[in-house]
Amino acid sequence: MPVNTEVQPTRQQHRLADPVLEINNLCTNFELRGSSVQAVRDVSFSLSPGQRLAVVGESGSGKSAMAMSLVGLVPPPGRVASGSVKLRGQELVGLGDKEFSAIRGKEIGLVFQDPMAGLDPLKTIGSQFVETIRVHQKLTVRQAKELACELLAEVGVNDPRRRIGDYPHQYSGGMRQRVLIAMAIANDPAVVIADEPTTALDVTTQAQVLELLERICDERGNALLMITHNLGIVRQLCDSVNVMYAGRIVEQTNVDALFNSPSHPYTRALLDCMIDPYTTTRGHLPAIPGSPPDLAVVQPGCAFAERCPLGREEKICHEQQPEPIATSYGAISRCHFAEQMEGVR
């Protein structure tokens, strides 16, 4: 048997490659009852091959709206108001439904929170899988079915040749999510976007799905954009993090710095809300005081000021929008006092 001498690129080599996805000054608005709700505000970041980037924040912080903006799936009355999204140099903002349909599933794979919402309950897994493959690849039905079986086996579905004829309701929640992951990578996309893919799963199944995503990205070199509110997932799976609040990225950092030296008060507040079963007092769950701001109102200062211990005391936090500050830990923070917060945990 011939020996395969091809050297597979390491994860670090993937990361040194040019970004596959570049987002600059992205803004997404929802026009509601005569007011404009700014769900995504001036978001910029890039994603390299093999990189596993988490986007974290409370519900309503703009995570999912941002992710759907990247692939042209913002539901009406939402729209991308301005900014740029480039995939391998191709501008995506402004593309029509037909052009986006050629990209979704081919260049960008999608894994959603509810696997049943991503699968047609009236069609077998095989028919849906074959359709997903043949839309983007010139394969016969037989060839597409063979590829589907290979991918189902790769993600841990036992006896795929038999189970490919089953309907979604005949799979468990964890197995349905594995099917969606297999379908997301079927056409070898450059980027996989996973929007809360483990929320509806039990802890054991959640861990298995995360291990699967990690293995898939390492072996195939896909870039992963993980949308989540679970910092435990971030620690286990990702290498870099964007923290979102009120539609804006307030901190960009690596995972080690996130947990050891957060440079934004909101990031620190999220970490303080992580539940420790050994120290949390029964009946008293940690929470961030106050409520998120009204996104229909443009505030002159920091959106987190009313809930922030520093913001409540400092006049500048209410009057001036903080500019991005690079910290010595390699993070970029939108906080007037980011430098003073470094190393304090």
Image (spheres, grey):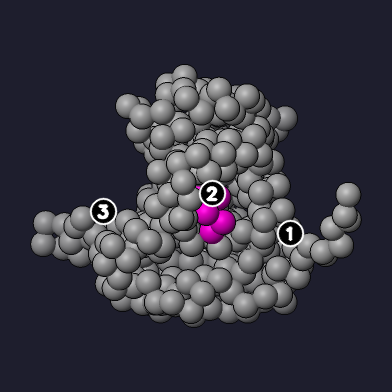
| Image: magenta residue range | 184-189
- The span from disc 2 to disc 1 (Cα, nearest Å) is 32 Å
**Between 193 and 306, the one nearer to me in the picture:** 193
Q: Give the x, y percent position of residue 274.
A: 61, 42
Which residue does the numbered mark 1 point to in the structure image?
256
Which residue does the numbered mark 2 point to in the structure image?
186
Q: Disc 1 marks which amino acid?
A: Asp
Q: Give the x, y percent position of residue 139.
A: 48, 50
- The span from disc 1 to disc 3 (Cα, nearest Å) is 35 Å
Residue 222 against residue 86 in the figure, above or below:
above
**Element at label 1:** helix
**Between 330 and 233, the one nearer to me in the picture:** 233
Q: Residue furthest top?
A: 170
Which residue does the numbered mark 3 point to in the structure image?
75
**Residue found at x 72% / y 30%:** 278
**Between 143 and 49, the one nearer to me in the picture:** 143
Q: Is residue 35 visible?
A: yes
Q: Earlier in the sequence, mark 1 or mark 3?
A: 3
Q: Disc 3 marks which amino acid?
A: Pro
- Crowding near pointer 3: few (<14 within 10 Å), some, many (20+)? few
Q: Closer to us: mark 1 or mark 3? A: 3
